[in-house]
Amino acid sequence: MKQLFIDRYGAAPRYRIFSPYRVCPLGAHVDHQHGLVMGFAFDKGVDLYFTPTDDGRVELISTSFDGEVSFNVRTPVQVRNHTWGDYARGVKYALRKRFELRRGICGLLNGSLPVGGLSSSAAVLVAYVMALAKANEITLTPPEVIRIASEAEREYIGLNNGILDQSCVVLSEREGILFVDTESEQYRIIRRNPKMPPFEVAIIFSGLTRSLMSSDYNLRVNECKAAAWNMLAYQDQPLKKLEKTFLRDVPRETFEKTRKLMPARFARRAEHFYSEYRRVRKGVTAWESGNLELFGQLSFESCDSSIHNYECGSPELIAIYELMRQTEGIYGGRFSGAGFKGACIALIDPTKRESIREAITTGYLAQFPEYRETFEIHFCHADDGARFLAVE
């Protein structure tokens, strides 16, 4: 990467940021409704090598995407052009709302895994926030990095997500799991209980890739909000604007009273939210006590709710999920990310790694031989959040 940077820009990069990908074994599809989430970063992600520019120029190349990105941080923010450069422009947009930007960067972006289901967009956005802040001598707290990256994705990219992804990318610590209340934005790291058996994270790519902007992600967000609005209206409660309405605002008791009155699809979305809230609470206790078997079972149940209540999951991902449930050595797992294409994740017994690889690969390709060239399994470890590293 260093030599590639030199070949393009004529000198070695001054800085390197590693921004990890994340997994969320519990708390899926609820952060945009101010729910409870659990997740951690792992030791694969995005590397951004960069050098500040004095004239405000931003020039970016990538080993994962074609073409180059070029703009200036000093000029007004432009509309999206629907390329990978929009993520850098989105960070410029969010930072300029708060700070004067005078310096840009020349950068090289390198991702270590295929795109799909691991919140690569959050990893990239966090890296750009940290890089442009460094170039402009702006000091940001971790919560500020999270908010700016989230704002760039919501307001500029147009994805109505919560703060789960950015929080895991920024706040994770390798010796524990991150627990976040996305309503209050309070968080803590739950350390691994010494009684917990060793585990690794299996990342199982279906062979498909997906863009959240072309999936039903935003539709699901709106359906959740419509469910909350329905419940409040049936109870003759004051209504706020739809974009300011969240399922977290509505007690479970209200849902039980009104679930049969609202359209069935809205009731299913709400059921996922409330049941996931309970699963995360149980998951915290399981993790604190070192009960990885129970934690894994809760993750399986979470995915089952995603299929039947949240109604996401392609045939490919559902096939992987069903194979995971049948495979010895897998404690638990679920779809990763939005769950429309992308990947599944599993917590596994490291001593069963190769038998798991063989069982999942054989079973999946028997059903979907067309993905033989793109199907992949990687085994990873929990890691710390985004950080500066030595340039090598």
Image (cartoon, rainbow, N blue to C red):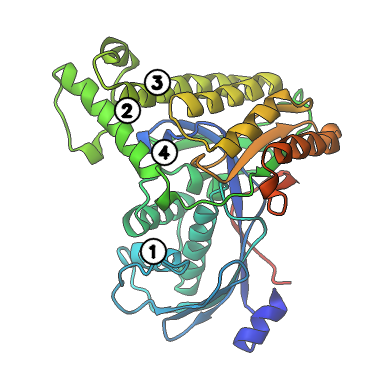
**Amino acid under label 2?**
Leu
**Amino acid under label 1?**
Gly
In this view, the residue farthest toward the bottom is 10
Check whether the beta carbons of the residues at disc 3 and disc 2 lie within 8 A of each other: no
Indicate which disc, 2 or 4, sits on the residue closer to the N terminus: 4
Q: Is residue 105 left or right of residue 115?
A: left
Q: Is residue 278 left or right of residue 81?
A: right
Indicate which disc, 2 or 1, sits on the residue closer to the N terminus: 1
In percent of the image, x 84 and y 34: which residue is there?
Answer: 355
Distance from the alpha carbon under mark 3 to that under mark 2: 10 Å
Circle 1 sits in a helix, a strand or a loop, which is it? helix
Which tag is nearer the camera, tag 3 or tag 2?
A: 3
- Please state, as top left, top right, bottom left or bottom right, where the C terminus lies in the image: bottom right
In percent of the image, x 50 and y 55: which residue is there?
Answer: 121
Q: Is residue 252 left or right of residue 64?
A: left
**Could you say where residue 226 lies in the image, as x and y percent from the top left?**
26, 31
Indicate which disc, 3 or 2, sits on the residue closer to the N terminus: 2
Mark seen at residue 247: 2
* Quarter location, residue 80: bottom left
**Image vertical order of residue 185 relative to residue 271, above or below:** below
Distance from the alpha carbon under mark 3 to that under mark 1: 34 Å
Check whether the beta carbons of the residues at disc 2 and disc 1 lie within 8 A of each other: no
* Residue at image mark 4: 185
* Quarter location, residue 247: top left
Other residues around mark 1 within 10 Å, as few (<14) / some (14–19) / many (≥20): many
- Residue 4 seen from this side: yes
Mark seen at residue 90: 1
**Could you say where residue 137 lies in the image, as x and y percent from the top left?**
46, 71
**Could you say where residue 336 lies in the image, as x and y percent from the top left?**
57, 40
* Residue at image mark 3: 271
